[in-house]
Image (cartoon, helix red, strand yellow):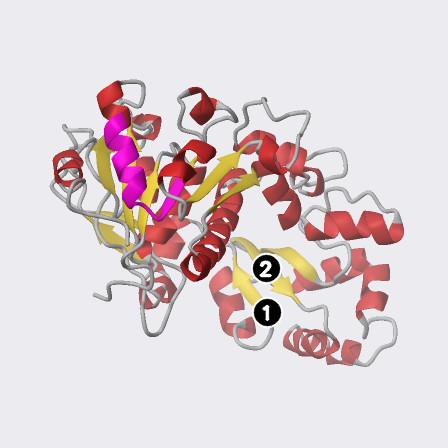
């Protein structure tokens, strides 16, 4: 197994639940030593379901396993003098620190960025907060708590998602956490690059609602350019046609054919080749003007065939994919070929569990799932024993 592109990078992870742990797991997958610093009671996510039926230990369930693999767990009480002293020694040896507390929590502990930077000027300190940190902009909501659903609502993604204009819809996965986490990982690597060249660390932060807004790119430019307040568009697209979901005999399929060439290929595949050259259908603008007719035409074909049949007819010819559930994903050879379903040990269970793999593929220094998530405090003795021998270069 490759040591990974980030081998030698030491990350102190004080974050909990989803956003911060998702970010630091990405770093761990690519070789960083991620030390998850937990309070004596542990990260609350350890107690989140699902659990294996035969797991008597219940050190953690699927939620925690899926975002904390490959990390080390160290228990420190940062309110206790001994715990604080050990933490400060770890800070002196670290390259990166990540936390997702509300603004002011670390300062009240006497462990804010400015204090830690005095100990380690090269430290890159990354924070995810619901509404950002006052250091980068005084939001009127800086003190508000937030979860994924709040970020999705205020960042705009719910307002452009849903079956109808008056029915906003929450995105299923926690994109209000995971998207800001991806952005924080990017910011951390940019700041580490600067620290390597200059010896200067820095504070960086991501607001969850800022991250969601950035994801919603067209919401901003539609309003700025055209004065349009974007709303839910159902399973279609306001600017492209056909582009969205269409009924199949046994579910739904995604088709995107807004360009002339792909429309011609789709028209031929559904037995209407003449529409490729018909001025009333041949361009994206023409199809947008009759979007309802386009949907009826396409679904008249797809609705009579199964997803498997449509995969044979459309696959490789037009941008197409069936809407898949978990069982279908586990059976799809793509995900096995790409290493996206990985088995790891589950403490307390007799059989391994499967988690999502590493989506970022590097040719020379590939990332990898480097082991299961840790038991609470599993590495405390190991890590603290090395405090007096490891020194930051």
Q: Residue at x 57, y 33 (%)?
A: 133
In the image, taking residue 30 as reference, residue 232 lies left or right, namely right
Residue of label 2: 254
Q: Residue 249: name its quadrant.
A: bottom right
Magenta-highlighted residues: 85-98
Counting from the top left corner in percent of width and height, residue 78 is at: 31, 23
Query: Badge 2: few (under 14), some or many (20 or more) residues near its Cα, within 10 Å?
Result: some
Residue of label 1: 319
CA separation, marks 2 and 1?
Answer: 8 Å
Front-most of residues 161 and 316 = 161
> Can residue 377 be seen in the rendering of this structure?
yes
Mark 2 / mark 1, whichever is N-terminal: 2
Counting from the top left corner in percent of width and height, residue 363 is at: 35, 74
Q: Residue 123: name its quadrant.
A: top left
Counting from the top left corner in percent of width and height, residue 299 is at: 67, 59
In the image, taking residue 150 as reference, residue 192 lies left or right, namely left
Q: Is residue 342 magenta?
A: no
């Amino acid at each position: 197994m490759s040591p990974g592109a980030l081998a030698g990078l030491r990350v102190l992870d004080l974050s909990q639940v989803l956003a911060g742990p998702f970010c630091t797991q990405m770093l761990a997958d690519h070789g960083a030593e991620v030390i998850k610093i937990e309070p004596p009671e542990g990260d609350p996510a350890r107690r989140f379901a699902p659990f294996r039926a035969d797991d008597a230990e219940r050190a953690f369930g699927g939620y925690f396993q899926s975002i904390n693999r490959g990390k080390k767990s160290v228990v420190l009480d940062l309110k206790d003098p001994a715990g604080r002293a050990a933490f400060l020694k770890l800070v002196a040896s670290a390259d990166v620190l990540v936390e997702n507390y509300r603004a002011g929590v670390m300062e009240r502990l006497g462990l804010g960025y400015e204090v830690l930077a005095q100990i380690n000027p090269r430290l890159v300190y990354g924070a995810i907060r619901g509404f950002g940190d006052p250091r980068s902009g005084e939001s009127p909501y800086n003190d508000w708590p937030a979860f994924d659903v709040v970020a999705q609502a205020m960042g705009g993604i719910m307002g452009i998602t849903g079956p109808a204009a008056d029915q906003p819809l929450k995105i299923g996965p926690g994109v209000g956490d995971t998207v800001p986490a991806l952005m924080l990982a990017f910011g951390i690597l940019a700041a580490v690059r600067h620290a390597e060249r200059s010896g200067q660390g820095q504070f960086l932060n991501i607001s969850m609602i800022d991250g969601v807004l950035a994801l919603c790119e067209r919401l901003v430019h539609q309003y700025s350019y055209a004065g349009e307040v974007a709303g839910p568009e159902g399973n279609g697209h306001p600017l492209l046609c056909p582009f969205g979901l269409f009924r199949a005999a046994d579910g739904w399929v995604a088709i995107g054919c807004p360009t002339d060439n792909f429309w011609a290929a789709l028209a031929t595949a559904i037995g209407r080749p003449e529409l490729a050259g018909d001025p009333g259908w041949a361009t994206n603008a023409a199809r947008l003007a009759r979007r309802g007719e386009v949907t009826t035409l396409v679904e008249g074909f797809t609705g009579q065939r199964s997803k498997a049949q449509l995969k044979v007819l459309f696959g490789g010819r037009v941008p197409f994919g069936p809407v898949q559930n978990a069982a279908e994903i586990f059976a799809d050879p793509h995900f096995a070929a790409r290493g996206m379903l990985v088995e790891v040990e589950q403490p307390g269970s007799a059989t391994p569990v499967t988690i999502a793999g590493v989506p970022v593929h590097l040719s020379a220094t590939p990332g990898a799932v480097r082991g299961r998530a840790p038991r609470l405090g599993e590495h405390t003795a190991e890590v603290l024993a090395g405090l007096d021998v490891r020194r930051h270069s």
